[in-house]
Amino acid sequence: MNKSLLTIKNLSVSFKLGDRITRVVENADLELKKGETLALVGESGSGKTVTAMSILRLLPESAIYPTGTIELDGQDCLAIPDEEIRHIRGNRVGVIFQQPMTSLNPLHRIGKQVKESIFLHQPAISARKANERALFWLKKVGLKNPANKLVSFPHQLSGGERQRVMIAMALINEPDILIADEPTTALDVTIQAQILDLIRDLQQEMGMAILFITHDLTIVKKIADRVAVMKKGIIVETDHPDKIFTCPAHPYTRHLINSEPTGGPDPADEDDATLVEVEHLKVWFPIQKGILRRTVDHVKAVDDICFTIKKGHTLGIVGESGSGKSTTGFALLKLNTCKGKILLGENSLNDMSKNQIRQLRKRMQIIFQDPFGSLNPRMSVARIIGEGLSIHRPGITRKQEENEIIRVMKKVGLDPSSRDRYPNEFSGGQHQRIAIARALILKPEFMVLDEPTSSLDRSVQFQVLKLLKQLQKEFHLTYVFISHDLKVVKSLCHDIVVMKDGKIVETGSSKKIFSYPEQEYTRLLIATAFH
């Protein structure tokens, strides 16, 4: 029998704001044994991350612990001095945080950030040895050209590469326990599979225990030895994955399992007119070198692609991280510099001035991948949603604006009485609804949805997909849906474009692509997503 490395007993966590105390975790019990993977699953706001971050006391100062202990080898992490807990962080317990882009410092090169933990826990190590160790770990986590990555900034790496850097940082001091907080949330299916394989291989090699926090039950089946299900701060069920998925004991567990996206898009008329037409679209980014910053080559992010989208239809763009999906979406709205022909109805976007494009913006909107990051934290929800009205309808009165905001909030399932609150007071699913409301208030014809459900748990994802279908049917909206989640794509998209290295490798109806994929790359994506 493996010895327990970590034991959480009767843990309660509350947050104090003024005189108000909010309980978010209630009498939680967890045990993590050496070499095992324990998956902690539940909806957004269920208390998963709060429970995990309590282990290293990484919660804000407003957090209090009314009951319970967190014992690491018999030592209570809640009771030890700050200096001791700092020694445990990144040394005995490593953490892969949920958002690699926001967890990495945008002002510092990757090498400096990777080596920071080495210098902190091994102060006697030389700079040369630290550099060698950083290079070794970047190679170990499968980064190509690791020497180049050491001197790169976070924004110069793809999502999958940033996640690999986070894994290297978490494991560089060879911890006994790894806390992986949604480590594959924003990654495409093939990169996701690679990251899971990598974590599993490193676990076997190092013998470490893993606390794996996720909302994706497909991952749980692949990686977990045991599963703990959490709802509203309470652990409602803990068991082996086979038992959880075949005969779940709690109704909430059954609800999570049944929230997988299924079915297909609502039927669309094949005779609908074409709304968007793209011909020979190119987005090339210059590679500049030398003191004079001469252009020596180009990164061909999107390289000579063509497709059309019919009014009222949804086109899914799928492919691996770095394939050019999001760049294509931004180009369609003229949010980056591109060449080629883009038609929105009768309007040729490439022939229009910036001012003309600005006038057209109310007809085309975007919902970004990170809902929280795209909302201004200093603005109330009412101001965020109504901002477009003041730009595109300058004569609107304050009362009319308020009525429009209330109308669209009701339409997307938000309580209008919460419109004076700020983004940090809402859950992940609500952030996405706010972003949809902001886009919808201008009554657009065409919307680009860039990974709009990737950071949401399955049950909230299910609700957002249902909402998008309802809105499309009611307003005859045309969507471009960019995603790495092929189950979501299958449930929403009428047609699909498969991209790889900036080019289209296959295109066709959703039914054709999923039933009879022609290209090996497409077959690989589908096999990885559904098996």
Image: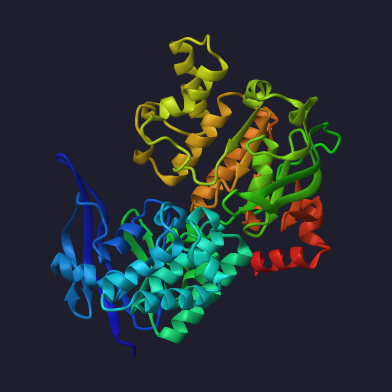
Relative to the observer, which residue lies in front, 296 or 44?
296
Please give left or right for residue 448 compared with residue 400 in the image: right
Residue at 44% x, 11% y: name it.
399
Residue 177 against residue 235 in the figure, above or below: below
Please give left or right for residue 261 compared with residue 124 in the image: right
Residue 396 against residue 330 in the figure, above or below: above
Residue at the farthest front position: 291
Where is residue 66 drawn, in percent x and y? 15, 57
Residue at the farthest right position: 271
**Among the 4 quarters of the image, the one containing residue 210:** bottom left
Where is residue 511 drawn, in percent x and y? 79, 54
Please give left or right for residue 434 compared with residue 322 in the image: left
Residue at 23% x, 56% y: name it.
13
Residue 129 shows in this picture: yes
Residue at 54% x, 46% y: name it.
369
Residue 493 against residue 127 in the figure, above or below: above
Residue at 23% x, 62% y: name it.
57
Where is residue 122 drawn, in percent x and y? 28, 77
Q: Quadrant of the N terminus?
A: bottom left
